[in-house]
Image (cartoon, rainbow, N blue to C red):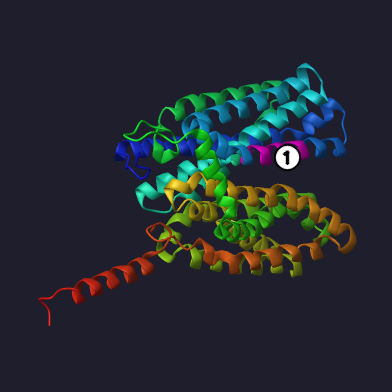
Amino acid sequence: MSDLTAPVDRPALLRWRTAVFAIFTASGLSIATWASRVPAIKEALQIDNIQIGFVLLLAGVASIVGLSLSSIVLARFGARRGMFVALVVVAAGVAIIGVGTDALGSYGVVALGLVLFGLGNGSLDVMMNVDGAVIEKQLGKTLLPLFHAFFSFGTVLGAGIGVLAVAWALNVLVHTGVLAGVILVLAFVSIVSVPARAVAMDPTPSDQPARDWRARMHGSLSAWREPRTYTLGAVMLGMAFAEGGANDWLALTVVEGHGADQALGATGLAVFSASMTLVRVAGGPLVDRFGRVTTLRVLAAAAAAGLLLFILAPSIPLVLVGAALWGAGVSLGFPLGMSAAADDPARAAARVSAAATIGYIAFLCGPPLLGFVSEHVGLLRTLYILVALIVASGFASGATRPLPGAHVGEGRRTESRRQIRKEKASTSDDPSLP
């Protein structure tokens, strides 16, 4: 059989890493492109918030379908072709949103664009995380937080381009058309450096007959029968719910819960996002020093403390401090959950897909439910739900401990203890010693 752990030479590995950085950036860029033009789309189509909410729901459902199909795509076509097609679908969705808005003035066409956008991004998310996890295993250090930081860079870049598009009075058709072209260029340029190898879940020739793709697909579904999938899902669920809750409700809570103006509400969300991005950039070295479990438990404590401060703070400066701790605390739950799911390269795609599905359902579907609760108890009190989920995520973080034979994410202290045990064992087995 082909070797799933066969190493890639270092120059090719670094090109592969750069390509996956670009793919993460393209995904974030696409999301911010849509989000930055929602007001313009609403005005052009003369639709209300309920209709906006409906197309967002369609995009969320399509994303979950894409997540669920990702294992099948990986088993049938491999990561290289799968990611390329997903990026093309995302670009098509972004372009169709613009066509529906300005060329046709059609709500249905915009909805179709969002369905394609969600389907492509949902499937792409699993595949790019599988590739990122394989790269970090080959390099022997934690990299998924940095990959996710590039996703955040993409959202910041997309938001900035959106601001410029509005300032220059570019309509949605021109804006989305140009960005769809950029995403296509990134797809063609980056995919060249992604190896078509078994190590990336791509079929390759071997001295043994390859498994039929249906057999590979059956194997990919077996992750749902593993208890570790659900404990990793619990880690990701709590953190993803808290991250999505901030995206949807933080700014409004600053305004309605703490009596601040809209500018301070936007500032609170910016502080949260900046804090999360900074910790993702620094997250790899932190995890390699202290290990996944310790890092996640400390960050869960920081997130819970920050959220409590955000809820109870008597002044806006303290609210912003709480938002910063909240963002920092939830920053690594999702990428480290992905990293842990990919500890065994032969089962990486199946386990990442299953864990990601749990996390993304929480991220996409959970926060809207907070709105219904807030109608009865208020926004600030509703956020106690997130505190409870963060605490539960911290308790479940032991599930991210590396599997036997997988050393990425165990931390230097654990690595040192393992080395000492090996030296003691070799010493005791040496018959020449007294």
* Observer-nearest of 421 and 227: 227
Q: On the picture, is 29 further left or further right than 284?
A: right
Q: Is residue 33 visible?
A: no
In the picture as drawn, the residue positioned furthest to the left comes out as 432
Measuring 54% from the left and 44% from the top, which residue is drawn there?
A: 220
60 inside magenta stretch: yes
Q: Which residue is mark 1?
A: 61
State the quadrant of the N terminus. top left
Task: Give coordinates of residue 188: x percent, y percent.
Answer: 48, 24
> In x, y percent, where is residue 219?
52, 44
Tell me the magenta residue range.
56-67
Element carrying mark 1: helix
Q: Position of residue 53 (x, y in %)?
A: 81, 40
Q: Residue at x 64, y 51 (%)?
A: 358
Question: Residue 47: which quarter of the image?
Answer: top right
Q: Is residue 160 magenta?
A: no
Residue lying at the far right of the rendered structure: 376
User: Does 196 appear above or below 306?
Assistant: above
Left or right: 13, with 64 as reference point: left
At which x and y percent is residue 326? Answer: 64, 61
Q: How many neighbours does mark 1 have within 10 angstroms: few (below 14), some (14-19), or many (20 or more)?
A: some
In front of the other: 276 or 164: 276
The kind of residue on which mark 1 rests is Val
Quadrant of the rendering where the C terminus is positioned: bottom left
Q: Nearer the viewer, residue 137 or 171?
A: 137
